[in-house]
Amino acid sequence: MRLHSLGITPLAGAAGWARRAGVARGLGALVLACALVAPALAQTPTWPAQPIKLQLPYGPGGVADIVARLLAQRLSDSLGQQVLVENRPSAGQTVASELVAKSAPDGYTLLWFNSGHAVSTSLFRSLPFDPVRDFAPISTVGFFGLALVVNGDSPIRTVAQFIAAAKAKPASFNIGTTSIGSTQFITAELFRSMSAIDAQIVPFKSTPTIIAAIKSGDVQGMVEILAPVMAHVRSGNLRALGVSFDQRFAGLPDVPTIAETVPGYESTAWNALAAPAQTPRAIIDRLNREVAAVIAQPEFNRRLQDLGVDARASTPEALRDLLASETAKWRTVIERAKIEKQ
């Protein structure tokens, strides 16, 4: 067959065939690439593709446990995967924090980050984790005050009487709180220092065990976050002598601030979420959005308010700044109070 009969010159025909061959090779390469990429994309799971474990550095029954489980339930609904809370109480929050710090940065292991982490760096000689370097902040969850509490039938009715009783019998006067390094513990230590009493601070693993110790007379008072003791106070089972806010708490308007007796006294705790360092920013941002959406829910907000918690979300950057400022604050408090490092 002559090329002229097809209306193609020999030169044009050669070039045309070359072009056709080039196109065919290009299409073949594209098809091959797609064939290779498609299985890879199909094998890449969309996060989250499995349950998420939230490591809680406290025992069950306390405010951290209550709020963490409320948040975890709602995150489970919005993420489409279960968020499981695992209680791992320990001094300085070391067990839960070290576990998360050494976990894969894949978004499936999270830490209940809190003001105790700002305290631990100054309260302990060494820690198996670094609160700044080892974690990626996600968002704050809530801010709350604490209370100085005694048994409901105690003859002690004011902060001034509590201080007087402690000074009268320093060898047998004990104040219960949660584990060493917790916000409750350091808040109690701050009270002991600023009120110039020589009471013993006795750490327990959980709030219910402290309440049992108050009932048995093993401790004469306790310093605890409001949430787990609110019902006891309102029923008269326990008596709140003072709150640690810088102003009276609307939920207990008749209870004075501790600062009304001990000028300058103030302590506010906070809870947050964090992930292992190097967790992809896309996962951090997704979790941040989900936490903010939960906190914006009126029902969730009201539930936390009933617990004495001010629900508040933040950016990851704002949480990192909060950690830095709180670490500096508590370092000064610990040094001024001359609290011995554990």
Image (tube, rainbow, N blue to C red):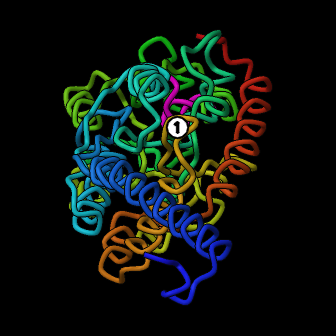
Q: In the image, what residue occupies the spot 33% across and 49% down?
A: 44
Q: Nearer the viewer, residue 172 or 5?
A: 5
> So how many labels did they put on this image?
1
Quadrant holding the C terminus: top right
Give coordinates of residue 102: x percent, y percent.
Answer: 46, 22
Image: 305 above or below 109: below
Q: Quadrant of residue 87?
A: top left
Q: Nearer the viewer, residue 23 or 159?
A: 23
Amino acid type, residue under disc 1 in the picture: Thr
Q: Is residue 185 magenta?
A: yes
> Seen in the image, is 168 located left or right of residue 194?
left
Q: Nearer the viewer, residue 227 or 110?
A: 110
Image: 69 above or below 150: below
Residue corresponding to mark 1: 183
Q: In the image, what residue occupies the spot 52% across and 37% down?
A: 183
Image: 208 above or below 158: above
> Seen in the image, is 312 located left or right of residue 204?
right
The range drawn in magenta is: 180-190
Whether residue 174 appears in this view of the structure is no
Q: In the image, what residue occupies the spot 53% across and 22% down?
A: 168
Q: Secondary structure at mark 1?
A: helix
Q: Would you call the spot at circle 1 few (<14 residues within 10 Å), some (14-19), or many (20 or more)?
A: many
Magenta segment, principal secondary structure?
helix
Give coordinates of residue 217: x percent, y percent.
Answer: 26, 26
Give coordinates of residue 112: x percent, y percent.
Answer: 42, 42
Q: Nearer the viewer, residue 38 or 144?
A: 38
Q: Is residue 127 magenta?
A: no
Q: In the image, what residue occupies the spot 46% across and 27% down?
A: 97
Give coordinates of residue 30: x percent, y percent.
Answer: 45, 59
Quadrant holding the N terminus: bottom left
